[in-house]
Amino acid sequence: MFPPRLLFPLIPLLLHSHLKAQDGEQLYGLYCAACHAPDGKGATGGAFPPLAGSEWLHGNPKRSVAIVLKGLHGPIEVGGKSYNLEMPPQGDALGDDQIVAILNFVHKAWGNKGQEVKRDLVRVVRAEFTTRTTPWTAPELLKLFPFEKKPTALANLTSRVYKGQWNQTPDFTKIQSENVEEEHSGILDTALAAMKEDFGIVWEGDFMAPADGEYSFILDADDGAKLILDGKTVAEVKGLGPIDGSRVAKGKATLKAGANPIRIEYFQGKGQQGISLGWKTASTKKWQWVSASSQKNTGGNPQIPLMPQDGKTVIYRNFIKGSTARGIGFGFPGEVNMVYSADNLAPELIWAGDFMDAGLHWTNRGQGFQTPMSDEVITLTAQRSLAPTARFKGYSLDPKGNPTFHVKIDGQLLSDAFALGADGTLVRTLKLSGGTSVLEIPLGDNPSVTTEKSVSLAPDKPVTVTYKLR
Amino acid sequence: MRSLLFLAALCTATLAQQKQSDFYTIESIPLPPGEVMEMGSIALMPGDKVAVTTRRGDLWICEGAYGTDLSQVKWTRFAQGLHEPLGMYWKDGSLYLTQRPEFSRLQDSDGDGSADVFETINSDWGINGDYHEYAFGTSPDKNGDVWITLCLTGSGGAASDWRGWTVRVTPDGKMIPTCSGIRSPGGIGFNAEGDVFYTDNQGLWNGSSSLKWLKPGSFQGNPTGNKYHKLANLPAPPEPVSGSRVLAERLKFPDYIPPAIILPHGKVGQSPTAIVPDLGGGKFGPWAGQVYIGEQTHSQVQRACLEKVNGIYQGAVFHFLEGFQCGIIPAKLDERGMLFVGGSNRGWASRGNQPFNFDRVKWNGKTPFEIHTMSAQPDGFSLTFTEPVEPASAANPASYSMEAWTYILQSGYGSPEVDQATPVVKSASVAPDGKSVRLVIDGLVRSHVHHLKAPGVKSANGLTLWHPEAFYTLNEIPK
């Protein structure tokens, strides 16, 4: 037996170091692991942001402390994947010791190399942002605590800007450039042209390969782009189109360690612009981005286009841009669509073509209003014309899914039916029953769609309005 | 020698360990292939049909969910294009839904198997397009009213009418604003007596998640929606003092009803959801009259017993079922004792790592050795057990320990556990039938969570408790 006197002083020491080492992991399991996963890779197979290998944990440790204290809101890119979630602030729920323990666990776990967080740092960051009551956004954090700038693989980079209107990447060698700049950041960014439309950029420089071997490249652009290494085209995004992953181009090249001549050609037509270029080797696995934008081709919301099935109208009741929060979208067969507002008790939007993309609302938490899948949405009316006492009473569907909306206005009932007409028209039948009042229903001012600007609706005298969409 | 003895003791303990699968079976009900079935609500229908709504706005009806061969289930889509329904019940041939913007009735008037009437019964509350403005609804109460609890706008705003309130919709479609002070509900339901409760999630003015009693006219503690008292022609409750405690504030304002049962953040889940009373008379285990509480983050179901002391509800929560494959949101208990649960972890992660689930849980008739109820006494607590205790262990005060704490009531997000106390179990007296134990305790603290641990208590058969702990919220100490 050990004499008790010898054994006892050891116990607190052992317990202390043991507990301290375990605390952070236990607390992480309790408060963080539900979302970030016990293995730090993000819950549900990475549907939530990973902490393992996260660039956000490296560099200035105040950044990690600030996030834990105040939470994080909205879009963020982690490890080349984008997320749009909500991290609740923990500063009022966790004490400084707990935050220190959790962060020191997370900063060293799973191969992370974050800096040690000292207790004083938590106190300092708390004091610094004591008046802040809202969670951070990713851009705010990067402004306060930027990532350490590392040289990218693009060295000796220059950019040339061209003016012109193209549908395909032109032969830039035959066009005179507007100006030439050195790009010491080693980052491709279309914003350098400071133009909105009809321009091109050619970047030239050296791709600094860390070793001999095969390199993979991923290129996406709005609109077109071409990647040329050692004079050979490795990847090309052709023609006009968005930077959303649907046209992404990949290619491979075998390179020698050191400088390899690289040339990137880009052109922009109208609307959105951007370029993304990443590279990796068999051993690095993750894409290394050499462009200002990288998320468009790896994340964003997946597209979930909705369309009529089996000849029946499809319904989408959600937040639709251009209508109110109580918008109800109907996609009729034959590519005719409308949104009825149960707030304003009227059809507000109509358009031809594709219906709605549910990707925004059916992934993550579904924040925001979704724009219909058309550039030519027609607003009929955008405010309520019926009396404040008018109440939405719902809708009924015929066997084809055509809706009739019901509105109660004091003693009267308004039924407002919509169905597909001939030649891509939408036919609206309004009927008023009960009472004696005549209703004036505004139809908006869209002569291309319907020449009437309003209809007078008397009880039991239905009125038909035809909206021409093509 | 000593280590051998220790090992032997450990083995005995292992043998005596009870586990969930000894009593309950969780079975996954196959879902329609290719569909994303993130669950929002469940309704039990005649003919052993079960209806579910999804967060994407579909309503499906399942036949065969009670069957012995679950591979035979048949699904029919009854409606689509609904707006995130989070409450549903069947009555007289219609399905009634609490959707985000309205309370509605769905009917299949032509009998073709899909809904064609979508009648809006009431839509008098506001929504503005913020995803957080959820609406959770009950089945009708004894008066036929449906209770709908309206989440705030975002975490801390009330930009649309009646956010932060619970309203009732009467059978004739009128909306009655009923309770204020709501933050972020995860579910609403009844206890066995038919009183209405909701679960509110940790956050602003909510130190920990809890089960709250929606006494008509009550204020639940979060002042964000108090601007709507004006709309209701009611005086607003006094603004709580940030940094105070629930007890201090409610003593100033009697309509401030404290959380009936605090579900200590992290220790008993992180996001409570559905509230399900056990009205089946013990067909789901010996818990008749108690309530079950869904838990999204930890993918669990908790069990709670409630009692009223000085007119205020309070009680204990116990860990119960765990290991669901997704975060639980809706749950319904059939009167024959079949518990249906559904889940989703879109936007809010859960321990169960599947994106959605629909499960049924059955009790196999074996009674676990467990604390059945915990109730407050002037000088301690009394415990009842599901099986007779072994008197020597249960009468030993050292078989028990207790810690107590509360939370800061503050405008910030959540709270640490504060004002810690260590009540001391002075004595434990076992009733002659061995089914209850009276604990005399020094140092009870009014309004604190009392965390009882009873690892030393053994059953007459030598078992230790399945879940050897309970969390009692002592709003009132009985006289």
Image: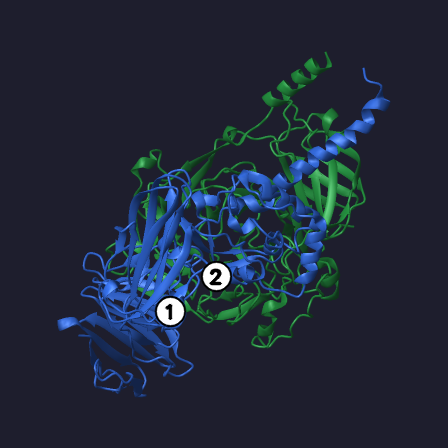
Q: Residue at x 29, y 37 (%)?
A: B72
**Residue lying farthest right?**
A5
Compared across the picture, whether A145 is left or right of B379 comes to left
Residue under circle 2?
B134
In which image quadrant can residue B432 be found? top right
Compare residues A87 and B23 and report the one nearer the observer. A87
Query: For this rendering, which residue is in front, B413 or B385?
Result: B413
Q: Give the camera-side residue of B9 and A172.
A: A172
Going by the numbered disc 1, the residue's amino acid type is Ala
Between residue B16 and residue A301, name the one nearer to us: A301
The residue sitting at 47% across, 41% down in the picture is B352
Q: Amino acid at mark 2?
A: Tyr
Q: Which residue is mark 1?
A: A193
Q: CA distance from mark 2 to mark 1?
A: 45 Å
The quadrant in which residue A454 appears is: bottom left
Where's residue A292, x and y in %? 42, 59
